[in-house]
Amino acid sequence: MNISLKRVAFPALICSAFLLSACGNKNAEHSKEVSPEDKVMQELSSEAIRNFEKTPNDQHDILLLVDYDYRYTQVSDEMEDELIKLSKSGDLTAEFSYTRKKDNLVSASEMLKNLDLKTEQGRYIQGLIAGYWDQQLKLLEQHKDKTLNDKSLSEDKLKGLGGYLHAQDQLENWRSQYPEIEAQLDH
């Protein structure tokens, strides 16, 4: 049975348009209510990239921040894999999950604070990330009795994520201004 894409796509497009317009009318009626999806989008919205003057120390700070991000991601991924494995086997306790996550956040925060950043932009990015880690530590304390599978913990993990994403965007923008730096990165 060979049905052309045009014959299937056009009716699907029409149906989608009707469904979207119906959803739009429903949303207009309840415009004062903030949906969970809207809350997520508000949390994830990132600020505009700030412009900073170039300095002789830019590449130094970029390398430190990229290396920090790489090392933290490696450690964090290993921890998450361990927690998922324990959860699947039924051996994960809320206490162990809490301890591992707290150790990971404290370690990330300490590693970040120990970076010898020399530029205003580097310290700006450092501050954004530090704010996110502080927020995550507070949330972890509030949910210390919950395990990896708890839904409210998953939703709360988004709090402050916009600042972290802004820091990542800021770093990527800064890094893109120095293409020669890629040769110095070994990961």
Image (cartoon, helix red, strand yellow):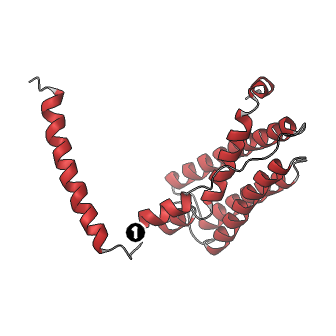
- The kind of secondary structure element at disc 1 is loop
Q: Quadrant of residue 5?
A: top left
Image location of residue 126, percent across then percent down: 79, 53
Tell me: 146 left or right of 121. Answer: left
Tell me: 179 left or right of 46. Answer: right
Image location of residue 33, percent across then percent down: 38, 75
Residue 163 vertical placement versus 11 (above, below): below
Residue 24 vertical placement versus 83 (above, below): below
Image location of residue 52, percent across then percent down: 78, 47
Q: Quadrant of residue 10?
A: top left
Front-most of residues 125 and 49: 49
Tell me: 155 left or right of 171. Answer: left
Front-most of residues 90 and 2: 2
Tell me: 170 left or right of 184. Answer: left
The residue lying furthest to the left in this view is 1
Give the number of marks.
Answer: 1
Q: Which residue is mark 1?
A: 35
Q: Residue drawn at (65%, 58%), measured in percent from left and top?
A: 163
Q: What quarter of the picture does the N terminus occupy?
A: top left
Image location of residue 165, percent across then percent down: 63, 51
Q: What quarter of the picture does the C terminus occupy?
A: top right
Q: Residue drawn at (63%, 61%), measured in percent from left and top?
A: 97
Q: Residue drawn at (73%, 36%), measured in percent from left and top?
A: 175
